[in-house]
Image (spheres, rainbow, N blue to C red):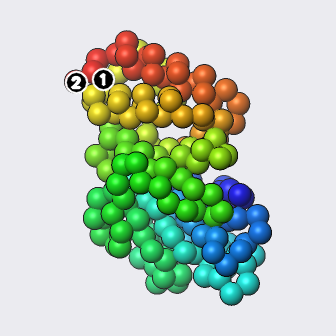
Amino acid sequence: MKIINLTIGSDIYTSNVYFLLSDWKAIDDVNALIDVGRDPSIIERIKQLDTGVGKKKVDKVILTHGHFDHASLLPAVKAEFHPDVYAFHSYNGASRVLRDGQTMKLADRWFEVIHTPGHTSDSVCLYCPEEGVIFSGDASLIITATDGSYQEDFVKALEKIARRNIKAIYPGHGEPLVRGAKQMIFRSLDNVRKSKVF
C-alpha cells in the first residue's frame, strides 16, 4: 500500500490529505482519500498520479470528522471524481455513514473504523492491522501532559487503540510518527488516566 500526503508544502491552512493506493492497482483495489482538506491543488495532483488503468481516480473519501480544514474541499472533489463519501455522522455531502468497528477496504488493505469522540463527536480513526498504521485525524493519540480533561468515551476509544498493534500514526496535522508509536500510545493512555475524566 502506498500512502501519499497530497498537502505537503501547501501554502493554505489545511489538514493532511492522505491518498491511499495499492501497489498493483488491481481493478478491485480501492483508491481512497482520507480527508479532503481545503487546498484545491490536490485535485490536479490526483489527476497526475497513476491510479490504475480503467479505474476511477478516487473510489472512496473517508472524513475523519467534519471540521472545515478536513472537509471544505469535498464539493469540488465530488464534482471532479464522483466518489462514495463516508463520515461518522450524516455530514453534508457524505453518502455513507460509518459505524464503530466497521471494516472497509482502502487501497489493497482492510481497515477498522474506531470511533474516537473527544475532539468532535464524529471523530474516527482508521486502523490497518496488516500494516500496523492508524490514521488519526485530529483525535489526540500523542498526549504528553497530565493536566487535561477527557470524556470517558474517548478514554475507552484510546484503550481500544492501545490494544492494537500500532507501528505508525498518521495524524491530521504534522508529520507521521513512525518510530515508537505503540509506546507513545501507552504513554498517552497513562497520561489520560492521570488527568480528569468525565
How crowded pointer 1 is (Cα within 10 Å; few <14, some 14-19, many 20+) is rated as some
Residue in view at x 48 percent, y 82 percent:
82
Badge 1 vs badge 2, beta-carbon distance below 8 Å? yes
**How many circles with numbers are drawn on the protein?**
2
Element class at badge 2? loop
Left or right placement of residue 73 versus residue 181 in this view: left
Name of the residue lying farthest toward the left: 198
**Which is closer to the viewer, label 1 or label 2?**
2
Residue type for callout 1: Ser
Residue in view at x 38 percent, y 35 percent:
157
Q: Is residue 80 above or below residue 154?
A: below
Residue in view at x 57 percent, y 75 percent:
58
Left or right placement of residue 115 versus residue 23 in this view: left
Residue marked by disc 1: 149
Residue type for callout 2: Phe
Q: Which badge, 1 or 2, is on the more N-terminal residue?
A: 1
Quadrant position of residue 25: bottom right
Residue marked by disc 2: 198
Q: Position of residue 56 (x, y in %)?
A: 60, 82
